[in-house]
């Protein structure tokens, strides 16, 4: 294996390791970003390198158009992961990220780079249909759903009183809802 790996267009380094035993790649939930995984990275063993996927339309990729399609997201992430060579990869995804991680694992397997682990949480099995069309509805419905899902609903309620903030954040959320609601295994 080569030396230290670095971030790419799709991957943000949360913790670099010169010669990692395993590279853990974290996939954020819908509406989430790579930086959410920084605290987790600091709690893992010192020989685990941690990267997180940064979807377009958020944080340092804010100006990029959203990609509201899970297979397309998985294709882009897989392409970046394949440049790392024969390193042991583990994937973790939560909610929407679980499905993107699953689809990425399938693509890595097809490229003969089978991950050593796939960890998923907060999501039904890929073949369970997701019934919903919030991505086609009004912003108020999206915000109400975000409030239901949030640990702190007030953190989402601010989107009602701050329209400029909503204009900034809701396109990425809507794109993620579209990706989830139109995904078919």
Image: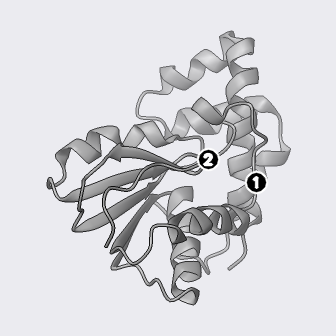
Task: Please determine whether, in this image, residue 108 is positioned above or below residue 123.
Answer: below
Q: Nearer the viewer, residue 154 or 66?
A: 66
Q: Secondary structure at mark 2?
A: loop
| Residue at image point 50% right, 89% down | 112
Q: Is residue 60 left or right of residue 139?
A: left
Q: Which residue: 65% across, 19% down?
A: 159
Report whether residue 142 is seen. Answer: yes
Residue at the limit of the structure toward the top, as seen here:
161
Which residue corresponds to the image point at 33% horizontal and 39% vertical from the top-left?
Answer: 38
Mark 2 is surrounded, within 10 Å at the Cα level, by few (under 14), some (14 to 19) or many (20 or more) other residues, namely many
Question: Which quadrant is the N terminus positioned in?
Answer: bottom left
Q: Mark 2 — residue?
A: 55
Left or right relative to 91: residue 175: right
Give the percent coordinates (x, y) of residue 27: 48, 55
Q: Is residue 121 visible?
A: no
x then y, percent, for residue 23: 33, 63
Say which of 179 and 136 sits in front.
179
Quarter occupied by residue 115: bottom left
When the figure is inspected, residue 141 is found, relative to residue 88, above or below; the finding is above
Q: Which residue is mark 1?
A: 68
């Amino acid at each position: 294996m080569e030396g230290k790996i670095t971030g790419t267009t799709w991957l943000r380094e949360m913790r670099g390791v010169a010669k990692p035993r395993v590279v853990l790649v974290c996939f954020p939930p819908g509406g989430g970003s790579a930086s959410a995984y920084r605290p987790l990275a600091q709690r893992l063993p010192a020989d685990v390198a941690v990267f997180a996927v940064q979807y377009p339309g958020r944080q340092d990729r804010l100006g990029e158009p959203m990609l509201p399609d899970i297979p397309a997201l998985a294709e882009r992430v897989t392409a970046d992961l394949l440049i790392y060579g024969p390193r042991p990869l583990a994937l973790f995804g939560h909610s929407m990220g679980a499905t993107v991680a699953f689809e990425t694992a399938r693509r890595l397997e097809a490229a003969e780079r089978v991950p050593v682990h796939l960890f998923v949480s907060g999501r039904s099995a890929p073949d369970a249909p997701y019934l919903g069309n919030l991505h086609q509805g009004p912003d108020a419905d999206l915000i109400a759903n975000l409030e239901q899902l949030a640990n702190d609903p007030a953190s989402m309620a601010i989107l009602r009183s701050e329209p400029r903030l909503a204009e900034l954040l809701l396109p990425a959320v809507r794109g993620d809802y579209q990706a989830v609601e139109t995904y078919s295994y």
